[in-house]
Image (cartoon, rainbow, N blue to C red):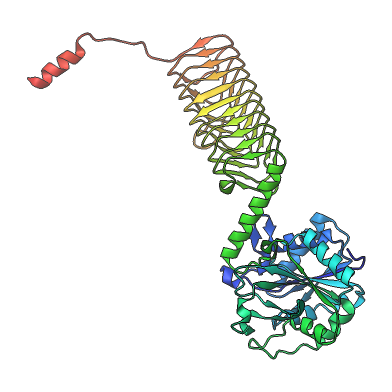
Amino acid sequence: MPEKLSVVILAAGRGKRMGSDMPKVLVESDEGPLLGLVLKTALFLNPSLIALVTGHKRELTDAFVEAWKKKNSHQVVVSSVVQEQQFGTGHAVLQALPILEKAHGPVLILYGDVPLLSAETLALLAQEHEKRKATISVLTALTSRPHGYGRIIRKNGELAAIRESKDCSAEEQLIQEINTGIYLVDSSFLAPALRGLKNENSQKEYYLTDIVEKAVSEGQRVCSLLAPDFRECIGVNTLEDLTEVNAILRSQRIAKFQRAGVTFCDPTSVNISCGVTIGTGTVIGPNVQILGSSALGERVRIEGTALIQDSTIGADTILKLGVRIESSIVGAHSTVGPFAHLRPETILAEEVKIGNFVEVKKSSLLKGSKVSHLSYIGDAEIGAEANIGAGTITCNYDGSSKFRTVVGEGAFIGSNTSLVAPVEVGKGATIGAGSVITKSVSEDALALTRAEQREIANWSKKKKRSKGS
């Protein structure tokens, strides 16, 4: 990249067509506000300064930029200037000239609502600019849907002008090479060209594109670079555009994981946040969301229809169909599901089994413990190798306060047991099925609270006779 590159980012617009009163550049994509993605790309180019042209609710944009600078701790100067009234892109860049007074190299013009543009493509544009010793270099793209974009007008193969879509003739409307709006312009040409702009067009706006025609008319060298992928140049003007951008961001993240050895059974149905890490050899089924700061180890298998939020999943763990895990830790070689729910502050050690229709909340389960069926474990500590029978619940809430249950190592809790906290079941103890345990149980003891079984002979037969009489 040029040593003295300056960057201008146009960020004055309002997201009216998106049903929002926020500055459009602060609309949230899957990877944060649109402007954050553009700033991230700009930093890869190592610019000497970044001029941000703001407008609608500029105080929100300025606050975001200040927070972004603190978070990224970069030395590049980011200065804001206000476009009070919006009279077109040329007028917007004109507002940045006071910031660019000390700029002596090329000026790169970007847009805060074009988030997918890659640093690699911009580096190619800069190389072409330098190689051709151009005054202006324009990034163009080919698309089968050019409606709404300015068209590239060529003469003898050379770029001669850029015609705004609304000003195109019927013949020019058929052109599929479009203007992306991304320019690299020598600073010595930019200032006088901007000051000479006129608004003699159907929109009565000052078009930035007119500086290209000016350069051509003066015999200046104007070159262009065709973007390798039109999708890089998509601007976000509507919610439909945002949906398309988010889909592309998701597919890019998934492709990156695939190159690192992660298998996706149906990539189009999977959503993975940008902060997620996934180990090699992991297999992810359809309809899976892995969100926030989640981290998956190596060789994890997710069968499908799962949501994992801000959680850590250990290596060689199997998450069966229909699992929801939130702010939890799952140890290696464990099994969760099908249809299980790990709520926040759940910690599973290695080799733990959580079975079908089990809910765990704010509890720790030590190595080798099992909760296999239809149970609720809340505010509890389950010891190593303990077995929790089907239908067991920890009664941890009395209507005003939460209480803790402790089950010792190797304990066996029979089916349909209620453990009324606060209560402790000792190491190796056994609880008979159907019990309601309200007092602590000693180590290796048997505790049960069932009433003695009674049998009344011929009771059913007598009942039927009485109904028939």
- Residue nearest the observer in this picture, 186 or 437: 186
Residue 30: x, y in percent? 64, 55
Relative depth, front residue between 315 and 347: 315
| Residue 62 horizontal/vertical position (percent) | 75, 68
Q: Residue at x 9, y 20 (%)?
A: 468
Q: Quadrant of residue 320?
A: top right
Locate the C terminus by quadrant. top left
Q: Is residue 131 left or right of residue 199?
A: right
Answer with left or right where residue 241 lies relative to residue 186: left
Q: Residue at x 70, y 83 (%)?
A: 87
Q: On screen, 365 above or below 429? A: below
Quadrant of the rendered image containing residue 53: bottom right
Q: Position of residue 205 (x, y in %)?
A: 69, 85
Q: Nearer the viewer, residue 106 or 33?
A: 106
Quadrant in the picture for residue 222: bottom right
Question: Up-down: is 460 above or below 29?
Answer: above
Look at the image and tell me whether residue 300 can be seen: yes
Residue 271 percent location from the top left of the image:
60, 48
For the question of whether residue 276 can be seen, the reply is: no
